[in-house]
Image (tube, rainbow, N blue to C red):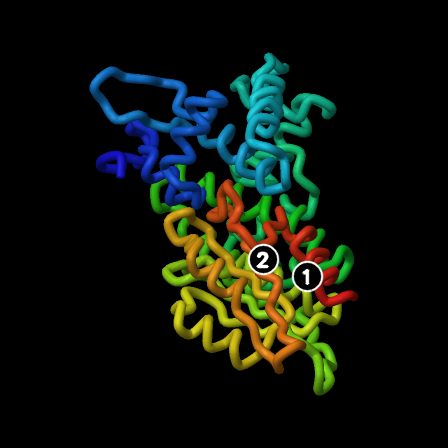
Amino acid sequence: MDGTDDSRPGTGAGLTTGAVARRFGVAPTTLRSWDQRYGIGPAAHEGGKHRRWTAADLALLERMCALTNAGLPPAEAARVARAETRTALEPKAPGVDGGPSAPAPDGPAAPRSTARRRAGSGLQLGDARVECKGLARAALRLDSHAVDRLLEAVIAEHGIVAAWTEVVVPTLRAVGRKWESSGEKYVEVEHLLSWHVSSALHRRRAVPDEGPTADPVVLACVPGETHTLPLEALAAALGERGLPVRMFGAALPAEALIEAVRRTGPSAVALWAQSRTTASRPLAQHVAHMTWGVRGARRQPAVLTVGPGWTAPLVPGTLHPLGLREAVDTVASVLGR
């Protein structure tokens, strides 16, 4: 912890490193390392006081996290994030209100700026897909029917992986940033959007005809980990590919996980950790070394450590796919599909 949080709007104090770590699911030590190595950290340093993250600092960090989750090495992700930030800060024609807000570099000035403010109600969506903006508008209105309709449409058209990566995640992050910069004002928006995303994933998840000899894929959050939405997206994407899944959800106790592996004899086990504090390397190694079957034909699961909590060095004997698409492809490869 870095001291008492003061993230109320209008204080100008910004967020502490501890608050930022909880928001992004990144360990405070990782944030400090990124600051020291790559300059991704609080821009303002006040002697003798806790370091505070401004909205601009958070935007840079959010892009850094997105790039590393997409598979870029941290050094390259930091370089790209800083370059994009510099581009975004280049002077542009003022908006219709005479303020600093401006459209994307490739768009017309006043009309697009006005449309963006109305469409996103202040959400920072940048050059995100148009579906993101529609979903953001519906969520900000707390329009459940519109959120459901938009999610169903984008999943039906693009599939789970593309819908999650290109629409759902950018929108959730934009809502999260709005929440952080506005105190508790937008908590209900994030909760509503997350619940409907979860519901849409459950509705779209196909149940394959496994057959008597199908070895399932076990999906579970590590003990103490309550962030399940990315794992639900993985379950839905695997189901979409016709792969058998056993989903155990949030904070599965270690003993229960081991028993589940023993009872199901899975071909693969995916362990989700949002935070480095919950990522249990000993547990992942233990599962990776589990075996079953008759002598001479014993088997063991491929273990995937998924989520931003599993930072380098990688857990020996496990796979570490970066992003939803790579995780699905890895499981499909393990199953020979």
Q: What secondary structure is marked by label 2?
A: strand
Q: What secondary structure is marked by label 1?
A: helix
Q: Nearer the viewer, residue 219 or 7?
A: 219
Residue lying at the far bottom of the rendered structure: 212
Amino acid type at image mark 1 = Val
Note whether residue 95 is visible: no
Percent position of residue 69, x then y: 58, 42
Note whether residue 17 is visible: yes
Q: Quadrant of the C terminus?
A: bottom right
The residue under the point 46% across, 40% down is 178
> Residue 270, located in which quarter of the rendered image?
bottom right
First along the sequence among labels 1 and 2? 2
Residue 331 is labelled as: 1
Q: Are marks 1 and 2 in contact (CB under 8 Å)?
A: yes
Q: Nearer the viewer, residue 87 or 179?
A: 87
> Residue 330, located in which quarter of the rendered image?
bottom right
Eyeballing the image, is 68 above or below 291?
Answer: above
Amino acid type at image mark 2 = Leu
Q: Nearer the viewer, residue 272 or 7?
A: 272
In this image, 317 relative to 37: left or right?
right
The residue under the point 24% across, 15% down is 47
Residue 49 is labelled as: none
The residue that disc 2 covers is 304
The residue under the point 67% across, 29% down is 112
Percent position of residue 220, x then y: 50, 66
Eyeballing the image, is 170 above or below 257?
Answer: above
The residue under the point 74% across, 60% down is 333
Percent position of residue 235, x then y: 62, 66
